[in-house]
Image (spheres, coloured by chain):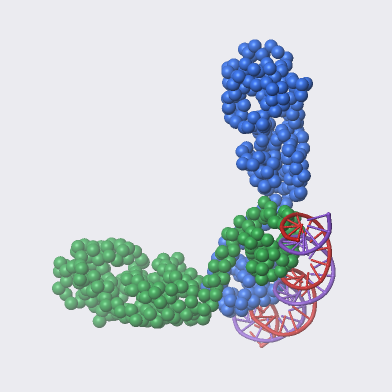
Chain colours: A blue, B green, C red, D purple
Amino acid sequence: MLDRSHLTIIKAVSETGTVTRAAEQLCLTQSALSHAIKKIEHHYQVQIWQKEGRKLRLTQAGHQMLNLANRLIPQFDYAEQQLQQIAQGKKGILRIGMECHPCYQWLLKTVKPFLAQCEGVDVDVRQKFQFGGLSALLGYEIDLLITPDPLFHKNVLYTPVFDYEHALVVSGQSPLAKLKHLSPNDLSEQTLITYPVEASRLDIFTHFLTPSGASVKQHKIIENTEIMLQMVAANRGVAALPRWLIEEYQQQMDIKPISLVSPTAPNGIQKSIHLGIRENETAPDYLNTFMALSKKVKVA
Amino acid sequence: MLDRSHLTIIKAVSETGTVTRAAEQLCLTQSALSHAIKKIEHHYQVQIWQKEGRKLRLTQAGHQMLNLANRLIPQFDYAEQQLQQIAQGKKGILRIGMECHPCYQWLLKTVKPFLAQCEGVDVDVRQKFQFGGLSALLGYEIDLLITPDPLFHKNVLYTPVFDYEHALVVSGQSPLAKLKHLSPNDLSEQTLITYPVEASRLDIFTHFLTPSGASVKQHKIIENTEIMLQMVAANRGVAALPRWLIEEYQQQMDIKPISLVSPTAPNGIQKSIHLGIRENETAPDYLNTFMALSKKVKVA
DNA sequence: TAAACGCATGAATTATATTCATCTAGTTTT
DNA sequence: AAAACTAGATGAATATAATTCATGCGTTTA
């Protein structure tokens, strides 16, 4: 029963001093305000104000309403502003899910201009998903999935943003460094360093070693890309990473990319990073902004 | 535009999970809620929720509305409760203004049974007023003024609650202690301790010293009654306080009351504590309760 | 003492909220 | 795979509530 409008009226009356001026301020008639307050006065059986000569005076109940108004109205106003900003795609949280460890470097490059362009929008990046990135997307844990392996789902729309070659990175000191490309059996005496995910999600296994029945001497797990490359540079192992990423670090480290050639991938392992979004809903503007920006980012 | 009702709807929907059940809870139809939300969706051009199979899912904007709802609705509810209780004269805040420092002891005795009797009513005591207690009362800062000096005003009704003698308190060791009463000139070599208010509001000046052209040797300011009495007991000065108050402390301290006799006050300074209330308005029940209680409280 | 000001109020009007009946789409049952 | 069911959306009809208009009454001002 007691409503925002009543609070607005009481506030306006206390500000302007008279109902008539309050009505002007609210673009209503004096009568409208008078009726409105009379109504809640009847409903709660309390007086809100009293005529005192020509002036009005708030009763205790009126003062309580005024207090309430002063507390609540700004919150309503702020919420409305937020709604309008959300409507214009200026406000929100873009929750990004990453399924592609080395893409982090790329993401940073995209997020930077995005934050500059969409001032009201925060970015949240998540990298671990209990049931995988796709279900995180469908379960509304994230709004955007960055993945090199776009698993089909009817409600998810994937957009490729850039192609890259998944190559082996080796130390400049390694004997392998002289080769232009190598085949699965060339790794039989090597130590392979990977991110801590299941082998079934590592392309070097699924698209290179496993189809040929080949394997490596040792398998080490490292979570951090830079450390991984330091290890490789120190000739303590080899790793599979995007060629552009390797080339980016090549200036500061003694490393080298080599194509992974096999019967199933005669030209090396070719991959595409895809952005996945839910298809059913109307995407907020800032999501489209992000998609557009992501296509402009150069990676090599 | 955005209103309490919308917040109520969103809250109910989030609690019950479906619009239909929310409608039941609010004693409305599913259609009503659907239309209401559609309206603000159109107005702000945002989605609040989405159908997802048989379930609903709040959008980001929807979640913000829900947050707002959870913050604001309880405040509305509380305000309504207060209104209803105010209507019944059962609930409110009794804002008491004190213009009489030593009356604090008396006030405590009155407030205690009052709080017991009026469970829903809070008491707020204010002691300092920028423009004095009378204007605080007329300006609705307080609802009740406790004063020994009832300044006339046509809209203020004063009721005397008890009479007392304003007497001098001296140490038992003081040579003055042997006197039954004393006159203004007897204080010429004494140190007078008073509360920190203007001399024009201290009866010992206005009704005793000043009319006779007398004065004291020294004037010390102390805010706290007990400390004041400790000082007196230690024979470091004398003070003017209600006789009943002095007698109350006489058991535990070596102090003594002495009447202040002068041509203008041949029987000592006789005072009355008055309760002042605004006359024009209908007083809430608990104010009358307080008035009634205050007359029963014995002070000596 | 008339004019001006300012709130209250009843009736008329306008706007808004709610319902009813129906539709659509997803989900479950058979 | 069809039928039955569930839950929300929607347009039109209706009910309710908000607003205005015209006017009255008390207070203040000139």
Residue at x 77% of width, y 44% of height: A154
Q: Quadrant of residue A177?
A: top right
Tell me if residue A207 can be seen.
Answer: yes
Task: Give the answer, above or below, for where A244 lies relative to B286.
Answer: above
Viewer-proximal residue among A197 and A27: A197
Residue at x 71% of width, y 33% of height: A148
Viewer-proximal residue among A153 and B244: A153
Q: Quadrant of residue A6?
A: bottom right
Q: Residue B253 at x, y = what percent? A: 20, 67
The quadrant of the rendering that contains the N terminus of chain B is bottom right
Residue at x 55% of width, y 75% of height: B84
Tell me if residue B190 can be seen.
Answer: no
Q: Quadrant of residue B243?
A: bottom left
Residue at x 65% of width, y 46% of height: A141
The quadrant of the rendering that contains the C terminus of chain B is bottom left
Task: Give the answer, above or below, for where A90 lies relative to C5.
Answer: above
Q: Residue A129 at x, y = what percent? A: 63, 40
Viewer-proximal residue among A149 and B183: A149
Q: Residue D21 at x, y = what percent? A: 77, 78
Q: Residue B33 at x, y = what percent? A: 71, 65
Task: Give the answer, above or below, for where A107 lies relative to A266.
Answer: below
Q: Taking C1 as reference, is B278 left or right? A: left
